[in-house]
Image (tube, grey):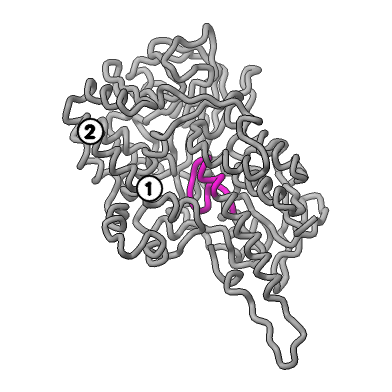
Amino acid sequence: MGDRIVIIGAGIGGLVSAAVLAAAGRDVTVVEKEPHVGGKARRVMVDGQPIDAGPTVFTLRDVFEQVFNACGSTLDDWVATRPAEIVARHAWSEEERLDLYADPQRSEEAIGDFAGADAARGYRSFRAEAQRIYDILDASLLRRSKVHWPLPLMWRIGLWRVGDLIAIRPYESLWKVLGEHFADPRLRQLYGRYATYCGSSPFDAPATLMLIAHVEAQGVWLIDGGMSALAEALKGLAQQKGARFKLGEGVAEIEADRTGITGVILADGERIAADAVVCNADPAALASGRFGTRAQRAVGATKPRRRSLSAYVWLAHAETRGFPLSRHNVFFSPDYPAEFRALSTGEPIADPSVYICAQDRDADGGAGPNGRERLQIIVNAAATGDTTHPTQEELDRCTHAMTRSLSRCGLQLEAAMPHSLVTPADFEVLFPSTGGALYGRDSHGWAASFLRQGARTRIPGLYCAGGSTHPGAGVPMAALSGQIAAHTLMADRASTRRSRPVAMAGGTSMRSATTDATA
């Protein structure tokens, strides 16, 4: 076998790194403190039913096809997927409803029927701009190592392509630019919600994030068994290539000497020797010393005010009445600015926007199941889980605000529904040192992409992967981070071998420029 590599955390990024490295002949051990793989892509039993408790929207299928192909397999060999006809169903009241479709022509017609011909034209111009931003940044940023300031990105895009450099619009807020396309505030609100995909506010995030709309427009897929089935498939793929998994065992310390990584110490005292470590945890856990004082210097700390959003998540098995749910549904607040003002100060949201994934429904708009169905219900929250622990009275008020928002749009949940409520404090326990932030740093301001942690750290041989690192939050981005970490690690190991000292009279040994750089 080749280099000894330990991967800390079996989230999507860690699983992809494990599969890619194992397929390349590396000796890979994955250590996960939970008894299951997936990280945020996990399942929770409620009322005897397994409910997906993490990400639910599967996009950029080609990213995963590339991973499975690199391991001599195909995605279809491991999971069953099918395209969603309805991307999402949206509501503002009982009378105001809008479906967006996989077919952009159907979406344009639906928007025209909902808000008029000008809105349909605005949708066309928005789609074109979102696609252009995506096309500019896909190969130059999303699928490559991180850059630390604008000039290297400009080189990748091409200094002569001045129009493209201007077109990504990093210096304007998403909310402002959406106003150029949509006069109807509801549509501005709908597309502003894409900022929350990376835990940010549309009022502070750059218009560059319009590219998320194009990602979704390329296709949303449904996975039999949910996102946890994808995680299990990646585990199986990595094991097939020789990776070993130690589940239910946490890492207490990352060992390093002056030359780099030497191993890890598990919580039970066992030591695993390693030449490199991929840490699939939020970089905040490294910076706070969760993996020991040696590893603490590997990355910079994230200030609490720069954390992304957290959430209140109800995992419910409930009967529903009224509103005809699709797989993905969004119920909007009547006052979006007020909602984000409350989030910025950590105050309760009086009228929250609510997302529901109805996991027993297909995305074709058909009828729902008879009786209870599995629901994941999400309301955004501030990432204060390390400092704030809500009382039962506060949790009851939050639940009441959520159900009131749904009722306003015509959806009724059974009053005594079996459910589990996950709070920012619970997410802090699951993902330590984050305050419950689910997406790493926020994406506010023009420099957000340059400030996000990259694959390389300040310690040679220690790498980061996951949704809190470059290129960003979300399942496909986490997978890309895992690929980038694996390829960066292998490039660095190869470079280190080439630059080892040689027996030369008067010769000197120089460290590799590649190793000294950060990604």
The quarter holding residue 68 reads top right
Residue that appears at 39% across and 41% down = 212
Percent of width and height locating residue 23 = 70, 48
The residue tagged with tag 1: helix, strand or loop? helix
Q: Label 2 is placed on what type of residue? A: Pro
- Residue 417 appears anywhere in the view: no
* Residue that mark 2 sits on: 185
Label located before the other in sequence (2 or 1)? 1
Q: Main secondary structure of the magenta part?
A: loop
Q: Which residue is mark 1?
A: 135
Tell me if 290 is positioned left or right of 219 in this view.
right
State which quadrant residue 325 falls in.
Answer: top left
- Indicate the position of residue 205 as horizontal and vertical percent values: 34, 49
The magenta stretch spans which residues?
Answer: 465-480
Which residue is more in the foreground, 450 or 85?
A: 85
Residue located at (71% from left, 93% from top): 506
- The image quadrant where one finds the N terminus is bottom right
User: Does residue 437 show up magenta in the picture?
Assistant: no
